[in-house]
Amino acid sequence: MDVFLTVLLILAALILLYVLWCLAEPFFLVNDKISMTRSELSGGDISKATVTKLPFIPQGSESAPDLRFFFFSDIHTEWCPVTAKRLNKAIRKAHEAGGLDAVIFGGDIITYPENAAKGYKYLNEVSACCKELGIPFYGNSGNHDCKLENAPGKSGFITLDSKAFILTSRKSDAKAYLTGVPDSGKLQRVWQEKLVCGSEYPVILAAHDPDALLHLAPDARPSFMLSGHFHGGQMKLPFRFEFNVLRTTDKFPKMGVIQGHFNINGTEVFVSRGVGCGILPFRIFSAPEATVVEINL
């Protein structure tokens, strides 16, 4: 009986620690850095491609990229312990370390439309920081944002949805398109096959759901893509329970693309874990993330 009671107490303690960590992890913010380099795009069925996982790079590493962004996604402000003040502090630090050509928000302001005002307030604080530093602030819509009216105007960012901007390298006359695709929401999903920009320059695509890449025509695939949506799994459960049981329509997770930096048929892809939480205010082994993205054209 004593052995049984001891085992029971150990299990109870482990469960308690697990729950406490689930509640604590959303308060952390990982500031990481990746370097994306243009490579030759290949055609064919991208769903059968070999996915190559690429590393993050140390924050203090020396580099001279063509473009340098600060990327964050999925704030879901109903459950977002990472405040705009903390995010702004990370933006300032990144700008001081090497300058920023843009701050980019990857979509999902809120989970429920009735809480939109809270999300707008959060992003307006980020917008104010960007204006103070003289950095353009761009964003695109997430699947939870499709019911919001004029979210970019109310949030203070420049929309990338079906828009294209030409950016010039900080070290040469090389140029790139920065563009985005709107998210139509998960219930009435509409995928785009073409982008609004031309093809004379490399394309940097902001697409909230990484699966958007699977639906682009081969001649419309970008050189670079920045996404969020999956939250890195948010709660990493055994056997990828979230994606094998709860989110079965997501295709990239079945290819091992849930979070991080990848090369997929020549497209350099970064999938952020996001900043906030979705429906549940928990994270486990998937801390909130904001990333410096360096682009080499």
Image (cartoon, grey):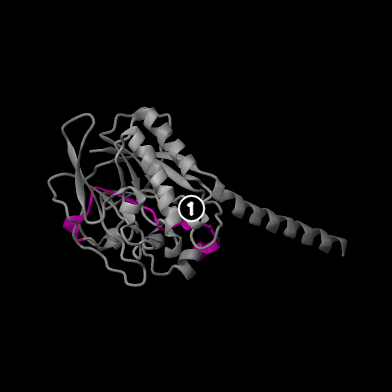
Q: How far across and down, in percent of the image, does residue 88 sit?
A: 43, 39
Residue 101 visible, this angle: yes
Q: Does residue 123 lie above or below 37 as drawn?
A: below
Residue under circle 1?
A: 276
The image shows residue 204 at horizontal and vertical percentages of: 25, 47
Q: Amino acid at mark 1?
A: Gly
State the residue lying farthest toward the right: 2
Check the picture and name the quadrant holding the N terminus. Answer: bottom right
Question: Quick check: is 235 in the magenta stretch?
Answer: yes
Residue 113 in the image, given as x and y percentages of width and height: 42, 64
Depth check: give the residue in front, 280 or 58.
280
Q: Position of residue 175 (x, y in %)?
A: 17, 39
* Quadrant (top left, top right, bottom left, bottom right) of the C terminus: top left
Local packing at callout 1 (Cα closer than 10 Å; few below 14, some 14-19, many 20+) is many
Residue 169 belongs to the span the image colors magenta: no
Which of the two residues, 163 or 118, is positioned nearer the viewer here? 118
Q: Nearer the viewer, residue 19 or 103?
A: 103
Q: Secondary structure under badge 1?
A: loop
Left or right, residue 148 beside residue 90: left
**Residue pictured at 54% horizontal, 45% vertical:** 28
**What's the magenta region?**
217-241
